[in-house]
Amino acid sequence: MEINWKTKLTSRKFWVAIIGFITPLMLAFGVSENTVTEVTGIIMAGASVVAYIIGEGITDTKNL
């Protein structure tokens, strides 16, 4: 089975799973809560940009 990366990278569930994996690891390694919050925000902001770019790319190719 092949992974559809366009769908995966635009999935909110995927990005929440990434955060759900990274956040406890950071806390376990003693990273401050402020830093964890900042990293979580950066990941979600990046996810929004990636989803937008892929979504626009798909829309543009369908309009050709």
Image (cartoon, rainbow, N blue to C red):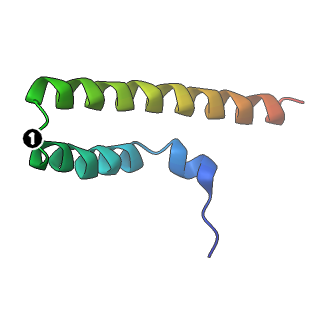
Q: Which of 30 and 25 is in front in this view?
A: 30
Q: What element carries label 1?
A: loop
Question: Callout 1: few (<14), some (14-19), or many (20+) C-alpha neighbours within 10 Å?
Answer: few
Q: In which quarter of the image is the C terminus?
A: top right
Q: Which of 31 and 47 is in front in this view?
A: 31
Horizontally, residue 40 falls left or right of residue 48, namely left
Percent of width and height locating residue 47: 45, 33
Residue at the spot of label 1: 30
In the image, is residue 53 above or below residue 23? above
Amino acid type shown at disc 1: Gly
Percent of width and height locating residue 4: 62, 58
Horizontally, residue 24 falls left or right of residue 5, namely left
Q: Residue at x 39, y 42 (%)?
A: 12
Residue 23, by quadrant, is: top left
Horizontally, residue 58 falls left or right of residue 40, namely right
Q: Residue at x 38, y 43 (%)?
A: 15
Residue 38, by quadrant, is: top left
Q: Nearer the viewer, residue 50 or 31?
A: 31
Percent of width and height locating residue 21: 26, 52
Q: Which residue is drawn at 67% across and 27% down?
A: 56
Q: Which residue is drawn at 34% across and 48% down?
A: 18
Q: In which quarter of the image is the N terminus?
A: bottom right
Q: Nearer the viewer, residue 35 or 49?
A: 35
In the image, is residue 14 above or below residue 34? below
Horizontally, residue 41 falls left or right of residue 27, namely right
Percent of width and height locating residue 62: 81, 36
